[in-house]
Image (cartoon, helix red, strand yellow):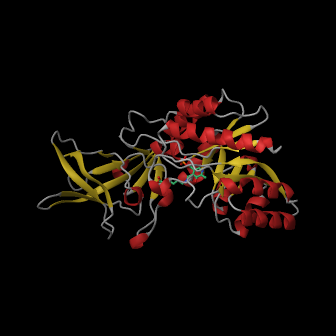
Amino acid sequence: MNKNFRDIRTPFYYYDTALLQATLDAVRCEISQYPDYHVHYALKANANPRLLQIIQQAGFGADCVSGGEVQAAIDAGFPADKVVYAGVGKSDREILTALKHDIFCFNVESIPELQVINELANKEGKVARVCLRINPDVEAHTHTHIITGMAENKFGIALHDMMHVVELANELPNISFEGLHFHIGSQITNMQDYVALCQRINEIQFMLNKQGIYPLVINVGGGLGIDYHAPEEHPIANFKAYFHVFEQHLHLRPEQSLHFELGRSIVAQCGSLITQVLYVKQTATKQFAIVDAGMTELIRPALYQAKHKIVNLTSRSDTQAKYDVVGPICESSDVFDKDVLLPFTQRGDILAIRSAGAYGEVMASTYNCRTLVTSYTDKEVVLS
Ligand code: LLP
C-alpha cells in the first residue's frame, strides 16, 4: 500500500522509477541502431541500490570511480565484464578489488598508476585490461568545477605523453592495452563540445594508426546535460541528438567499439528532494522560506551555484510571492535559490526540489550532526 507523502518524515528523496525506466528505454531505443555502442551508467551520479537494480536490469554496464563503486556495481548485479573503472588516485586495495572481479577495463590516468596495476596484476597472476585516459584539451562549456578535459585539469594523460605511455602499456607483461578513454566534463548541453571531442579523437587515432597502433575501445565518457529549468517539459534528455553527433563525427574502424559513461542524464530528472517549510521569515528586504532540507541533502546549489526548480506541492493559494528558499545549516551558502516565485507559502507546506536525482543523495553528508537523508520510490509513496 503506497503511503501519502504528507505522512512521511521530511526531508527525503523521492524517485520516480517509471520515469527512470522510460529514460532507460529511450537510451536503449537510440543505441539499438548502433550495435557497437555500449552505455556504462556512471554510479557516481547516484548509487542508490534500488536505482542500480533497475539500471542493471535494463542491460547497462557500470562506470565506477572507486573500489566501493566497483563493489556496489557487482553487488547490484552488473556483469563484471561491463564494468569500467576510472580515477586519478586508485589505491592498491581498490585496484585489487577490481582485479579480483576481472572488470572489463581500468581507465588509467598516469604512468605510475599503470606500473602499479601491472605489478599488482602480476602478483595476482592476472592481465589487466587497460584504456588510457587521455586529456584531450577540449573545452566543455559548463561550470568550471565540472570541466575535466582541459590541459590544466588533474585528469588523464597529457596528449604529448600519450605515445610514450601507449608504448609502455604495450611492453608491460600484465597489461593488455585496449584503447582510449576521454571525459570532457558534465552538464554539457552544447553538442558542439562533443563535435570538438570527436575531431580531437579522430586526430589522435590518425596519429596512433600511423605508428601501427590500433586501439579497439574508444570511451568518450559522459557529461550529457539535462534541463534544470523546465524538467516537466523535458523529462528525458535528447539522447537522439547526442548519439547522432558521434555517429556523424567520429571515425571508427569496423572492429572498434564505442563506450559511453552517462550518469546525470540517466537519473537526474527522476529524483526530487522533498522538504517541509519550517518557518517563513520576513525581514526588511527579504522573505525567507526556511525548509528542513539543506546543503547536507543537496549541496549542488552551494557548491556549483546550481539552480533546481522548486515547487510547492501543497499550497492551494492563487496569490504568488517571492521567497529565498534556504536550509537550516549554519552556513551562508545554505541557500537553494533566491527570489523564487511560489504560491503563498506557509509553515508545514511541502516543497519539491526537482531534478535532484543526480549528485544529490549520493553527495549527502551528516554535517551539523544531521541524519543521513533517506529515500523512497514511487512504489512506496504517492506524490500527488
Ligand atoms: N565519466 C567520468 C570519468 C566522470 O568523471 C563523470 C563525472 C562521468 C563519466 C559522468 O558524467 P555525467 O554523465 O554524470 O555528466 N557533482 C557534479 C558533477 C560531477 C561529475 C563528475 N564526473 C554536479 O553535481 O554537477
Quarter location, residue 36? top right
| Position of the C terminus by quadrant | top left
User: Which of the pair 216/289 is nearer the observer?
Assistant: 216
Say left or right for 266 vs 159: left
User: Can you give x and y, in whole percent of width and height, for residue 377 in the image?
Assistant: 48, 47
Image height of 34 relative to 62, above or below: above
Residue at the spot 81% in from the left edge and 45% down from the top edge: 211
Image height of 24 relative to 276, above or below: above
Say left or right for 66 vs 272: right
User: Which of the pair 130/84 is nearer the observer?
Assistant: 130
Residue 18 shows in this picture: no
User: Can you give x and y, in whole percent of width and height, for residue 100 in the image?
Assistant: 79, 60
Residue at the spot 38% in from the left edge and 33% down from the top edge: 233
Residue found at the very far left of the displayed protein: 284
Residue at the spot 73% in from the left edge and 67% down from the top edge: 112
Say left or right for 145 vs 338: right
User: Which of the pair 43/178 is nearer the observer?
Assistant: 178
User: Which of the pair 34/184 is nearer the observer?
Assistant: 184
User: Can you give x and y, in whole percent of width and height, for residue 93 in the image?
Assistant: 72, 69
Question: What is the tally of numbered marks visible in this picture?
Answer: 0
Residue 139 shows in this picture: yes
Image height of 246 relative to 367, above or below: above
User: Can you give x and y, in whole percent of width and height, for residue 367 in the image?
Assistant: 42, 70
Residue found at the very far top of the displayed protein: 33
Residue at the spot 72% in from the left edge and 46% down from the top edge: 82
